[in-house]
Amino acid sequence: MMGASTRVLVESISTGMILAEAVCHPVTRQQLVPSGTVLSQQNISLIFRSGVSSVTILSFDDKRFDDLDDIDAPAPPPRPTARLMDRYEKTTDSLHGKMKQGLTAPLGKMGTGPLGNMFNEKTPDTIESKVARFKKSELEVMAKEVLTRNNDVVHGIEATFKENSKVDFQVVDSCVQTTLQEIILNKELLNSLCDLRVYDEYTYSHCSNVMSLAMVIGYTLGYSPEQLRILGVAALLHDIGKNLIPDFILRKPAKLTDREFDVMKTHPEKGVKILSAYRWASPEIRSAVLHHHEKVNGMGYPNGLQGKDIPEMAKIIAIVDVYDALVSDRPYKTAMPPNMAYQIIMEGFNTHFEGRIVWAFQKFIVPYPVNCLVVLNSGEVAKVAKVNRQSLLRPTIELDGQMIDLTNHPRLSIVNIYRPR
């Protein structure tokens, strides 16, 4: 359910407002704009032309949860250390320097703009030639550098927000554009980004992982550089509303009560509440943040939107949000083996997740990337030698110097990724 709402004359509506109720034509009663839509200028023009006199707009109201104080909550966590803030400042200074051009000009269309030269017909060949020069160890070093930098940024964003309730768009945008450049030029870097967990805290590493994975899916779907930039910002900030959720709920090492889960489910609305203070947070960004827990069958939240009513960027963030959560350690559970997480994603085809997005997901994001070590049901440890695109859960492996195509050995299977202790 959405929060409190208010009736507003159409003359008073503006971009960025969120519909609490669907807008229907006053004569035919045909739905024009679904509930939960973050209004764009196009939406507003349509509403004006229809002759509708007023609409119902979401009015953020946290009074529903004022009584949470009576829950036995632990003391708040300590403020960020000076060392963390120092790392954050150094990281943001570096990002500002690298992406200054991208912050002063739009990305442009294919072949133009600061990153446009990466998007042309010759890009795949360029990518393959670059990737061929990287060894696995080098990819892992690069991935750790990317994740370390991005996690420092996410830590710093949260620390800054807790300090003065502000979100630094230049830092966010620099982080997104730098990451975009790296994963496009070094496609196989993504495999290492998926596996490495630089920090234990779920929220921080999760946000940077979701950003990287979402942009790769957007790239697969043919997004322009500017669309990827918007998607990356929305993905990085998709959980920004959790800063307004009590920490004892976020970090609870057990299943949430129904009451606590109801509070947790308000974080998309709270995220839009935070972003509503910033002109740079476009309707596309706000829509993606608001609807990243919707499901195509209408069983998600906060609006229970279905199918085409859910913004595509929200659908992209939804699938990588779930996948990364499943394969990550959480306060209340250990990480799920990639094969099980992958199966859950596939089972959500056209029910939880749109089929087109699932297709893009499995095209680049594989459960067992080349060179990773895996544990077999025989107890042996093998190395993945080749991804089988027809059967992603059964790659070709190298075991005791022999190449084994698991599609030809039905009794042999992978049970988990091997992570040395």
Image (spheres, grey):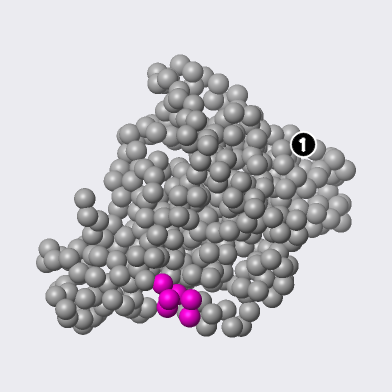
Q: Which of the image's four quarters has the N terminus?
A: top right
Q: Position of 48 compared to 35: left or right?
A: right
- In terms of depth relative to the viewer, which is nearer, 97 or 177? 97
The amino acid sitting under disc 1 is: Arg
- Tell me if residue 209 can be seen: no
Above-or-below relation of 250 to 318: above
Residue at x-position 46% and y-position 43%: 204
Above-or-below relation of 357 to 259: below
On the image, the x and y values in percent for residue 90 come to 56, 43
On the image, the x and y values in percent for residue 60 come to 66, 33
In this figure, which residue is indicated by the disc labeled 1? Answer: 7
Crowdedness of circle 1 by 10 Å Cα count: few (<14), some, many (20+)?
Answer: some
- Tell me if residue 59 can be seen: yes
Q: How many numbered discs, if any?
A: 1
- In terms of depth relative to the viewer, which is nearer, 184 or 12? 184
**Magenta stretch bounds:** 129-134
Above-or-below relation of 251 to 303: above
On the image, the x and y values in percent for residue 281 come to 69, 47
- In terms of depth relative to the viewer, which is nearer, 242 or 24? 242
Q: Quadrant of residue 256?
A: top left
Q: Is residue 133 magenta?
A: yes
Residue at x-position 53% and y-position 70%: 185
Q: Quadrant of residue 382?
A: bottom left
SS state under label 1? strand
Q: Position of 66 compared to 334: left or right?
A: right
Q: Position of 355 compared to 36: left or right?
A: left
Q: Is residue 269 magenta?
A: no
Residue at x-position 22% and y-position 55%: 420
On the image, the x and y values in percent for residue 78 come to 45, 25
